Image (cartoon, rainbow, N blue to C red):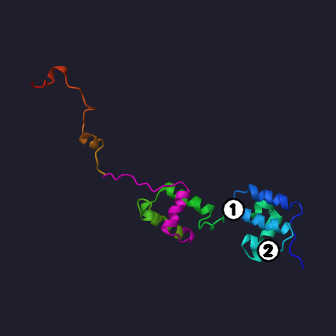
Amino acid sequence: MRGLSLRSDFDVSSVRAAARVSKDGAQTRRLLALASIYEGSSRSQAAAVGGVTLQIVRDWVVRFNSEGPEGLIDKTSPGRTPLLNAAQRAALADVVESGPIPAIHGVVRWRIVDLCQWAHLKFGVSLSEQTMSRALRSMNYRKLSARPRHHAQAEGAIEEFKKNSPHGWRRSPSGSNSTPAT
């Protein structure tokens, strides 16, 4: 019984040509293994060329048949789904923009730990501080803190204590140059 057949629109020379121009080493190895099948080699021999098992060669054949040579390039994983969906992120952005209400939230400024607690109470989602920080950063928020200022500080009090240094070095008047003793 024969395994899956390869696409009929490719032949040995076209598969080898695709392997020659490929910039991806793994794709080149896979194409060369499939080229050996096009030449009449067995699947076991193709597995030896590719340095893999028969099942992996079968997977390559399936991907090659469905997508062509581009199907043999490793794709990046989409990653884990975010813990907060788009609606929850929008609500988080609204809360961050509006700021906390001290009587309701119990804080005068948002800290990441406070936002984690808010998300848990509001959505039932438990987030670590690192995950919340990453989520806020992906929404273009940064951890900024205003410089603390005393509530009773007089307006303009700081400017009175700043030094008023001369703007730069000045040349001495020509008459006051000291002449060296001979």
Q: Residue 101, image x and y in percent?
A: 45, 60
- Is residue 128 covered in magenta? yes
Q: Amino acid at mark 2?
A: Gln
Q: How many marks?
A: 2
Q: Is residue 75 left or right of residue 112?
A: right
- Is residue 134 covered in magenta? yes
Q: Residue 89, image x and y in percent?
A: 58, 61
Mark 2 vs mark 1: give the one in front.
2
Q: Closer to the camera, 171 or 130?
A: 171
Near mark 2 (Cα within 10 A), the count class, few <14, some 14-19 or many ≥20, is: some
Residue 56 against residue 106 in the figure, above or below? below
Q: Closer to the camera, 154 or 166?
A: 166
Q: Is residue 73 visible?
A: no
Please identify the quadrant where the C terminus is shown: top left
Q: Closer to the camera, 40 or 66?
A: 40
Mark number displayed over residue 97? none
The magenta-colored residue range is: 122-150
Q: Which residue is mark 2?
A: 45
Which quadrant would residue 53 be assigned to in this image? bottom right
Give the residue furthest to the bottom: 1
Q: Amino acid at mark 1?
A: Gly
Which quadrant would residue 154 be assigned to in this image? top left
Q: Secondary structure at mark 1?
A: helix
